[in-house]
Every structure is written in structure tokens, then in C-alpha cells.
Image: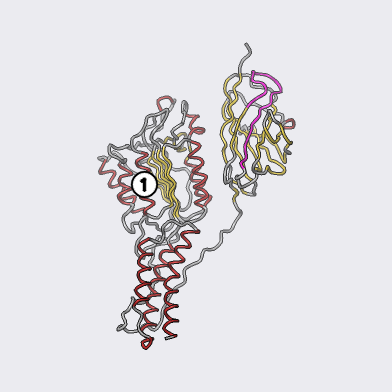
Amino acid sequence: MLRRKWLLLLTTTALLLPLASILIVKKIWKIPEFASDEWIATTEEKIINVANNLPVASDNSVMDDKLKNVMGELIAQNRLAMQKEYRTALVIGNSKYKLATELANPTNDATDIANSLRKLGFEVTLLKDADLRQMEQAIDNFNRSLRQGGTGLFYYAGHGTQVDGENYLIPVDARLEREQDVRYESLPVGKLLNVMEDASNDVNIIILDACRNNPFGRKWRSLQRGLAPPTQTVKGTLIAYATSPGKTALDGEGRNSPYTTALLQHMKTPNLDVEQMFKQVRTDVLKETGGKQTPWESSSLVGSFAFNAVGNNVATSAGKSSPLPTSTTPITTPSASPITSLVITPSPTLSPTTGTRTAYFTQPPSLLKASTTYNRVSEPGAVYYFTINLPENAGEPLQKITIQQREGLEYIRFQLDKSVAFEGTESQEGQKIEFNDISSDQKTQTVSIAFNPPVSPGKKITIGLKARQNPQFDGVYLFGVTAFPQGEKSHSQFLGFGRLHFYRRN
């Protein structure tokens, strides 16, 4: 009787352990649904059934065999659940443009893609009708998620364009009077590629259903149709376009675009490799559009990936998918032949990441105001003030600020030795902040200011650049402000533009 109670306790513990590990990992690591509710329910049922049907103490050998078989199956199932990679996705759909033609389907496309990805185990952030600030903030958050490893996916539906071979995704608040405005009013795809390269994951997927007709092109001197082929390659990345480079894609007459309709259909196909999946998407879109639209991909994937990896086919980033090791025998009944051993192959462990840590702002600083003491042309000795707020939850001190003149008919030069920085605002000047270095690059029209010591979070600071003289030509001059956190390697955060307007004398 004592032996039976001991084995009952051992059996229950062994069965509960995989279930408990899944629940703990889901709660603490917040890994999205890699262990299904069906698996958990099945495990619970087996615990009850085994406990209720244990043989009597006189048949200890049969009970030992049953215990080994049940443990083998459940631990194998547990390993299968645990080895599925972490999946994260950022999905953006822009339809309601303020200064351009509205699109019918992008928000529908983004919503449906987000729902499908969640069902396929992705942790999804969904943005609809996003402005530039929201898109940039989402990219920064996406970057932090990517650094957890696993698989990253970015999907965008909406207006997109190319300028000089660089692709840009257009937010709903973009004001694009000229081609030059695109660089300051839109999100460059190159920034997204940099984010994925920085994360160094083996599987990254970018899907761009963003090749609609350029609604701003008629205002520009030149018009480049569609999106450009990628000029930057990142290992382990697949970039999928709704149509071939230089062509335009259809928005569609139904709920979804032809491209997204095909994606939604084939993403759920069990164990279909992602590159083969996009071939099937291409076939469907060509058929649906009568050959007018040809989806196109650029891939540097090394391993295999399937959106809907089921059974023993778990996607691997380092090579081909392969079945996981499982128990060598199925569950047996009391009359079955006993097994002689239970073989359980240990799961691989993750090795720590090496290399220099990249510093990021948890909550980025913000540019509050830009002003000048004199705004008449050719006025000498004016000071240009840029006020920046570093929030308490920034996560890192502020090490450096760059201020780059992006627009204006004349390059403005500064007296760097007479420029200052202090806590507070122009009207409420506080403690002086020392410079570690201040320099100017005339080629890029950029002033770089490094602080010593770096500025602690929770402060509002103002930088005052003393100009030799105001420009001779009137008009608007734009200055792009970028912040860098403290660190040997830091991720820059663009804060926006300071706008100064200079006037002629009456």
C-alpha cells in the first residue's frame, strides 16, 4: 500500500510538471499561446484518468510500465510546445489619409492579418490610420520585442512611394508638396530593415501591400511608380511586395486587396514553407487580376519557416524542419508488453547573446519647442533655442543631441564656443549643463552636442546655438533634432523638426 501511494504521488507530480511549466512560462514570459488550450485540457484529462485507473499494488510492474509510457508521451508533447519560437508582429493599415486619396481596404487588410497572426501564435501590435509619430513609436517598441529572439513580422497596407530608390511608407498625416518632403514626413523602409538587422534574428518577414498609385505624384517634378527593389539586404529576412518593382497594386473591390486575400488563404496551410507559400500567393493574385499584378519577393532566409507549423514539424531557423524526438513507444494498456526503458532527449538550451549592448530609450525624449531671439534676416548674434523633455521613464540618460539643418535657402553657421545648454526653458533658465564636446559638420549641416555628464531622466533641457548671423534669405528653415542614449553603442531617436521662420525688414 505504501508503494502504491508513493507511485501515485510520483505519477501525479510527473504529469502536473509539464502543465505547470507551460502555465508559469505563459504567465511570466508572456509567450503567446505556444501551448494550446487543447493540449492543457488533454493533459488535465490524462492526469485524472491515470489517477482513477491505477492498478492494485500487487501489479506493480504494470503500473511502472504505464507510468513510464504516460510520462514519455506528455514530456514529448511538452517539449514540442516549448520549442516553438517566440513570434512577434507589427501590423499597420492606413486608409483615412487627410491630404491624399482615401483607400478602402488597408484597415480591413491589417485587421484581418492581425487576427490570423494571433491565431498562428504571434504577439501582435495593430495600428490603424497611424500618423508618423505613432508609426515611429511602434517601430521602436517593435525593436524591443524583436530583441527577445524568435521570428519577427512586419505588415503594412496603405500608400507607399519611392524617391531616389528608397521606399517610404506614408502616414495618414503626411504633407507631401514636394519629393523632398517624403524624407521628413514618411517612414523609410530602410529604418525597419535596420531595426531587424540590429535584432540579429534568423527569421524576419516584411510584407508590403503598399504599392498603390502615388496620390502626391502629380505635384512632383518626377513620378516613380510603385516601390523600388531593396538596396539593402539583411541576413535572414524575406521582403514581400504586393507587386513587382515599379508597378502598382490593386486595392480591390471586396473587403481585402487581392494580395492580402491570397495571404489570408495560404498562411493557414499546415507546414507550408514560407517561400512556397508566397509562390502560391503569386499564383492566386495573377489569376485574380488577369495577369495585371505580379507579387514579388526578395529573400535571404537561411532556414525554414511555416506560419502554421503543426504536429512534429516545428519551424527551425538554422536548417530544415525536422521531427522532434518523442517517446519510443505509445501508451500501453495493462495487458501490453512492458517497455524496458524510457528515452527522453533533453531540449536544447539557449546560449547567451554576446557583443556590445545597444542602448535604447524606453520612453523617448520629445522636442517641445524651437525659437530664436531675432527672426529678421541678416540679424547678427541671434540664439536658436531647442527645448527637449527627457521623461522619467526614459530608461537611459541622454548622452548626445544632433541638430541638422534640413531645409532653407542658406546654410546657417554657429559660434560653437558661445553656444550653451541648461536645465529648464528659454524663459526659465536653470543649472548650466556642461559639454563634453560640441562640433559642426558643414557637409551634413549638423551640429553635434555631447554632454558631460549625460543628462539624467526626468529633466527638461534647452540648447542655445548662437548663430553668426541670421540667413540673408527669408522663409522657413527646418532643423531635425535627434537624441542618443548613453552607451558605447546607442540607438538614435529622431525627435522631430524645429521650425524657424525668418522675415525681411519692412
* Residue on which disc 1 sits: 113
- Farthest front residue? 1
Residue name at image x 60 percent, y 56 percent: 355
Q: Residues within 10 Å of mark 1 (few under 14, many from 20)?
A: many
Taking the magenta stretch, the answer to whether it contains residue 372 is yes
Bounds of the magenta segment? 371-391
Name the quadrant of the N terminus.
bottom left
Task: Name the colour scheme.
Answer: secondary structure
Q: With 394 as the anchor, is 278 left or right in this view?
A: left
Could you tell me residue 361's position as x and y percent? 59, 45
Give the quarter of the image for residue 405: top right
Query: Which one is in front, 200 or 265?
Result: 265
- Farthest bottom residue? 58
Could you tell me residue 392's position as x and y percent? 62, 43
- Farthest top residue? 506
Query: Which one is in front, 408 or 256?
Result: 256
Task: Give the vertical position of 363 relative to 22 (above or below).
Answer: above
Type of the residue with mark 1: Ile
Q: With 444 as the anchor, is 195 left or right in this view?
A: left
Residue name at image x 51 percent, y 41 percent: 137
How many tags in the picture? 1
Give the quarter of the image for residue 60: bottom left
Give the quarter of the image for residue 344: bottom left
Could you tell me residue 250's position as x and y percent? 32, 37
Name the quadrant of the C terminus.
top right
Query: Which one is in front, 158 or 29?
Result: 29
Residue name at image x 44 percent, y 35 percent: 170
The secondary structure type at the circle numbered 1 is helix
Could you tell me residue 483's position as x and y percent? 61, 40
Task: Give the vertical position of 58 relative to 428 (above or below).
Answer: below
